[in-house]
Amino acid sequence: MVFDIISAVPDLLQSPFQHSILKRAVDKQLLEINIIELRKYGLGPHNQIDDYQYGGGAGMVMMVEPLDKCISELKAAHKYDEVIFVTPDGKTFNQSKANELSLKNRIMIILGHYKGIDQRIRDMHVTLELSIGDYVLSGGELPAAVIVDSISRLIPGVLNDGTSALTDSHQDNLLAPPVYTRPADYNGRQVPEVLLSGHDKKIEEWREEQAVQKTEALRPDLLED
Ligand code: ADE
């Protein structure tokens, strides 16, 4: 799966994809992440990419022309299943959206900064607008890293144990049950007996029960869906 990410601050995106699971996925060629520097398409001697907004008001707006040139060049070279703009006014990203997007081949992600991007880019190119929650961040880089990470771990072969993603919180609208590792007794705090029993069916039932209890206590809204 390929992600082409257009960013005004590409340095912010370097580290998240260079470690751990995502790095291994890139090394195994299950995942390709291309970061395109928007400023290369900027206008004039200073490679301008933002300007004052029409109608007045605080905050700069990312200009239509650099983004349009960049997006059009990418579209001419590749076929995209989705062109995503990450924005606090998008649809809230969740696990079911991650599952759906993990089946795609190539996705473009446009990252905003300042007050936003010229509406005409959204009208001309964007097929999906996603927010990672009801709060505002300084730019789209961190949301993009979140979205790409959650999608990428669902691509077959990315996680060593293919069943692992299926037992994540939210996969079945339940929070994940508690997990433990050695030692079985830490200063008198014991790992639940059942997990030491070796009885697979009982362990599965216990996990299910814990997941339901935890979800009822912390996120009852998930059970209503
Ligand atoms: N850009 C700024 N804030 C954001 C958010 N919450 N989700 C997606 N993109 C954003």
Image: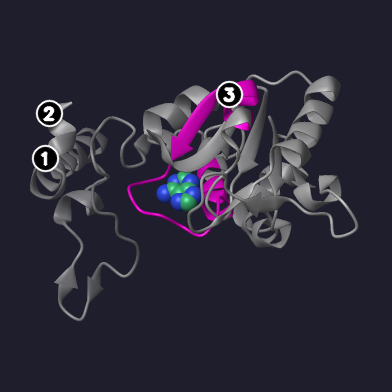
Q: Is residue 31 above or below residue 102?
A: below
- The residue type indicated by label 2 comes to Glu
Point out the stretch of residues depicted in magenta. 121-147
Q: Nearer the viewer, mark 2 or mark 3?
A: 3
**Residue at disc 1, secondary structure:** helix
Q: Quadrant of residue 206?
A: top left
Category of crowding for the residue at label 1, using alpha-carbon neighbours closer than 10 angstroms: few (below 14), some (14–19), many (at least 20): some
| Residue 154 image point, x, y percent | 52, 33
- The residue type indicated by label 3 comes to Asp
Residue 160 visible? The answer is no
Residue 185 visible? The answer is yes
Say whether residue 221 is magenta: no
Question: Looking at the image, which residue sits at the far bottom?
Answer: 187
Category of crowding for the residue at label 3, using alpha-carbon neighbours closer than 10 angstroms: few (below 14), some (14–19), many (at least 20): few
Residue assigned mark 2: 224
Q: Is residue 216 above or below residue 181?
A: above
Residue assigned mark 1: 220
Residue assigned mark 3: 123
Label 1 vs label 2: CA separation?
7 Å
Q: Is residue 26 left or right of residue 194?
A: right
Is ligand 1 less than 8 Å from the beta carbon at label 1? Answer: no
Say whether residue 139 is magenta: yes
Mark 1 or 3, nearer chain start: 3
| Residue 125 image point, x, y percent | 64, 24
Q: Quadrant of residue 182?
A: bottom left
How many marks the image carries: the answer is: 3
Determine whether label 1 and label 2 are within 8 Å by CB: yes
